[in-house]
Image (tube, helix red, strand yellow):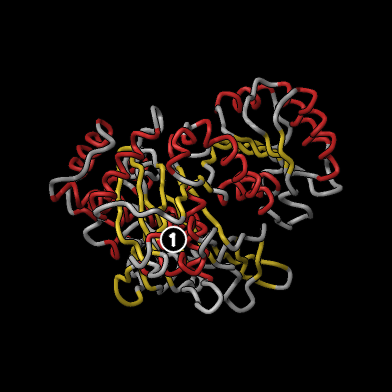
Amino acid sequence: MSRRSDAALLIDFGSTYTKLRAVDLAAGAVVAAGQGPSTVTTDVTIGLEAALADLDRHMGGLPEFRYRLASSSAAGGLRMVTVGLVTELTAEAARRAALGAGARLVGSFSYRLTDGDVAAVVDLSPDVLLLSGGTDGGNSEVILHNARRLAESSLACPVIAAGNRNAADQISAVFSRAGKPLITAGNVMPAFQELDIEPAREAIRRVFIDRIVHAKGIDRAAKMFDAVLMPTPAAVMTGAQLLAEGVAGRPGLGPLVVLDIGGATTDVHSIASGDPTGQGVVQHGLPEPFAKRTVEGDLGMRHNARTIVDTEGVDRIAAAAGVSSGAVERWLSRIEDDVKILPRRAGDRAIDHAMACAALRIAMRRHAGTIRIAHTAAGPVAVQEGKDLTAVKAVIGTGGALVHAAAPAEVMAAALGDPSDATSLRPIAPVLYIDERYMLYAAGLLAEVEPAAALAVAMNGIRSTGGAHERSGTG
C-alpha cells in the first residue's frame, strides 16, 4: 500500500457476521479482509473488535484509514410497511421505493385502512412506514383517512408521507397533534403512471441513518468508524449501478443483473432501462425503475428451504440432484433442525445445488418482465409488462451460496432465459461473473466519497466464469 492515508475500511454489520474489507484507494483493490461474529443484539463493539483483530492479523498491522464507512443489514435489516391507495398504482410505487432503498418489506396495505389493518400494522412492528396515495391534485380523502388512523394508533415508528402533495400540510398537522414523528417526501406517483421514487428512497435512508442505526445499537461503536451510510442492500445496489454506468473516463459494464441467494431471501437487482427490444412490442403497466431490486422472502436457502422445494416440486429437485425424494425430505428436516447447517455429503451438496438453481430460476422469473399476445380490434399485439432483460450482457453472482458453490456458473445459468418459456424476458446470453470477495457492498459505500476508486474496486472484485452463457433445457 503506497501511503497510510490511501487506505479505506469498509464495514458490513450483518446479522451473522461483521465483515471488513481494507481497500488500497490508489490501486483500487482489496488488500485484506476480516470478519467476526455479529454482536449487534448485545454489544456491537465486541463483534467489530473481533473483526478488526482478524483484519489486523491479515495485514500485519492496521493503517490509519482515510475512510471508515459502514452499511448494515443486522437484526433483519430495515423492517418497513407501505400503505397506498390502489394496489397496482401508488401502493406498488411505494413498494418499489422501499425495496430500492434497501428496506425489508414486511407488509403492504391498500385503500382505506380498517381496524384490522391498523392492528396488523402495529403487530408487524416496522422500523418505518411509507404512506402514499393519490396523484398530486387527485384523491386526498384516502391518504388523509389513513394518516389519521395511523396517528391515532399505537404505532411508534417514524412515518414517511410520500403521497398527494395537496394533502401534505394536513397530514403534517395530524401527526403534529398526535406528537408522532413524520417525514414528508415527494409523491412517489405525482401523475398517473409517472414514478418519482428517489425522494422517498432518500427519506428512507435518512430514517435508517438517524434512527435505525441508534435502535440497533450500532452507534455504540461510533468511535471505531466514521459513518453508517445506508442499509447493505442499498450499498449493493449503489455498487451495481456504479459497475453498470462507470465514471467519467472509464466505462462500466453496461446493463447488468446481480443475483444474491441468502439464507432467508433471494435478491435480484437489475440496472437497465428494460425497454422493449422487440419490434412493435407495447409496454403496459407502471414504468420500471432503472435500478430495480426485488426480494423473494420465500426463497431463502435455509429459513425457507422447504418453500423452495414445494414451489419447484420435490420430484424435480430430486431428479436434478440425482437422489430420491426421500433424500430431499431428510435434508430438509436437517435444515429445519439447524438453519446454519452446511452440506457435507455428496447427496446433500447435490440437493443444495438443485435448490439454489430453483431459487434463482424462480426469483429471476419474478423479477424479469413478461410478454403476451393481446387480441385487439386492430389485431394481435405483443404486450410487455415489467422489464425486458433479454439483452443484458452481464450477470453477477454474489453472496456465500454462489461464491462457495462448486459450480457457480451452472447455478447462475438457471436464472437465464429458457427456450421453453418464451414469455419470460430473462437475460439470454450474458457473461457470468462472481463477486468472489464480496466487494459490491464495499464499492457502494466507497462510491459516496471516491467513485473512481470504487469502480476500480468493483471491477477488480469480480471474476468472469468464462465466455457468454446461454441456457437451454426446461424451465
Given the image, on which type of amino acid does mark 1 rest?
Val
Choose top left, top right, bottom left or bottom right for residue 154: top right
Q: Is residue 341 above or below residue 373?
A: above
Using the rendered image of the protein, determine whether residue 374 is visible from the camera's viewpoint. Answer: yes
Using the rendered image of the protein, determine whether residue 413 is visible from the camera's viewpoint. Answer: no
The quadrant the N terminus occupies is: bottom left
Residue found at x 48% / y 55%: 445
Choose top left, top right, bottom left or bottom right for residue 65: bottom left
Q: Is residue 368 left or right of residue 167?
A: left
Q: Is residue 176 left or right of residue 80?
A: right
Between 126 and 22, which is closer to the camera in this rendering? 22
The quadrant the C terminus occupies is: bottom left
Q: Secondary structure at mark 1?
A: strand
Estimate the x, y position of residue 100 in percent, counting from the top left.
57, 52
Q: Is residue 262 left or right of residue 118?
A: left
Between 75 and 408, which is closer to the camera in this rendering? 75
Q: Is residue 74 above or below residue 65?
A: above
Residue found at x 51% / y 46%: 227
What is the number of callouts on the image? 1
Residue found at x 86% / y 48%: 137
Between 398 and 285, which is closer to the camera in this rendering? 398
Provide the residue designation for mark 1: 258
Choose top left, top right, bottom left or bottom right for residue 286: bottom right
Estimate the x, y position of residue 337 in percent, counting from the top left.
25, 30
Q: Is residue 371 left or right of residue 146?
A: left
Q: Is residue 332 above or below residue 366?
A: above
How many C-alpha atoms fall within 10 Å of the one at disc 1: few (<14), some, or many (≥20)? Answer: many
Between 221 and 266, which is closer to the camera in this rendering? 221
